[in-house]
Amino acid sequence: MRLPTLSKPIALPFIAWVVLCFPLSLHAQRLTIPESSTTVTTASTSSSTQSTSQPQGQVLKTYPDGTKRIVPLSSLNFRDDGNSFGGAPTLSLLPPAPSTDSTPYKKISIAPIGDASSPATIPGPIPSSADTAAQIPMANSIDPMGGSNPAGSAPVDPLSGSAPSSANPLQTVSGRPAPLSDAATTADLGTYDDFFMNASIGGSIQGQLTARRVYNGHNMQAYPCGPLSAENFTFEPGFRFDVEFGYNIYDWLGVSLQSGVIYNAIDQYNITTNQTTTVSGINYGPGSYQLPADGELIQVPIQIDGILRWPGATAFKPFIGGGIGAIWQQLDVNNYTLGSNNIQANYCRSAFQFGFNGQVGANYTVTPGVDFYGVFKLLGAFTPRIGNYDFENSYNFALEVGIQSRF
């Protein structure tokens, strides 16, 4: 069959269209040969290896018994009270291990999380000095494990959209700050917000007891009365022993109940006469006489005290205190000597009086919860009445050393 001959005007556009479309058709129909399965697997394996070899943050847990654990940062949500290793651990942030083994290795004892068995010793990289100042931001939401809502710095919460403004210390799952302070520079004084008990002993000096009035068989009569115009007792240095039980409301404030025994022997019985007196055939004219005597004054205070201490975590704590309460006093006069005569007095009377006390001293912590202390004490009673005598104010001074236990 004979094809019709195209005219020249029609042939030229047709030829141009064929020339343009032929390369495009070749490109569209070009075959693409897929890479071999070996190549794809190798690339995938290389990618996985690269992903798993990336360094991850780790935390060093150090327990009171010396056990150390290296755990990933993501495991901190696990509750770890450290009961099998002496208590809660301190936490230190470890830098990621380098890809090349250039960090020196040390032998450390570690145990898997949640395993109470004996720790094993394996080589592990740890820095020469753990960074105890490292902080890890925590979420600002309530801890789902039962902890508190920390108020520290953290990334923006994707749910609430809020972010705290300041950094907070590393939190345990209980919500309490982890102990990241250096134990070498921290003074452990023991508790100052619980009970305490004191025991002390020392010397005492009793002031002179001067009679203001005397009972003459009918009423209390002021001096001069009868042949005597004045009577008083002086005392030798004695001793004082105290016990005290109290409660520390704060480290600087405590309250207590105090009691003890104070003993002072009588030194002299002093009298002043306003007329001549005859004793055993000997006349003693008007005047003053200092008569050696045998006897004692015993005092037992039972008082409530308040104590103010120097605040702060210091081993040396000065304090002052005072209180009020009752004083039981007993005055015994067995005999006294007048000239060559030994006169039997056989005087023994006792009574309760209202009294007060003051003290000043200082504690020094020798071990957590145990203090040694020294204290100066004053015990007073206003116009005590003991038997036939109504005395002027009584004062007793004591200097004591003691030990305090806080628990």
Image (spheres, rainbow, N blue to C red):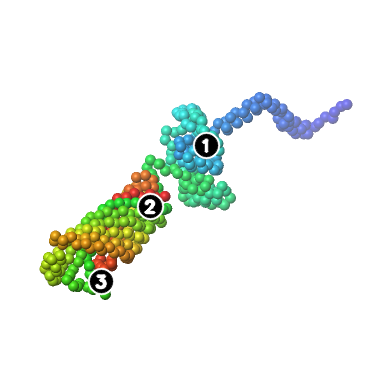
Which residue has dot 2 on it?
Answer: 197
Q: Position of residue 225 (x, y in %)?
A: 19, 73
Q: For the residues carrying marks 1 and 3, which lies nearer the camera in this image?
A: 3
**The quarter of the displayed image where residue 188 is located:** top left
**The quarter of the displayed image where residue 42 is located:** top right
What label does residue 215 carry, if any? Answer: 3
What is the C-alpha distance between the residues marked 2 and 3?
42 Å
Q: For the residues carrying marks 2 and 3, which lies nearer the camera in this image?
A: 3
What is the C-alpha distance between the residues marked 1 and 2?
44 Å
What label does residue 256 carry, if any? Answer: none
- Identify the residue at image location x=29%, y=59%: 298
- Identify the residue at image location x=55%, y=31%: 53
What label does residue 71 carry, if any? Answer: 1
Hey, what amino acid is under mark 1?
A: Val
Please tell me whether mark 3 sits on a helix, a strand or a loop: strand
Query: Of the residues under marks 1 and 3, which one precedes in the sequence?
Result: 1
Q: Position of residue 328 (x, y in %)?
A: 32, 62
- Identify the residue at image location x=64%, y=25%: 39
Residue 208 visible in the snapshot? no
Residue 147 visible in the snapshot? yes
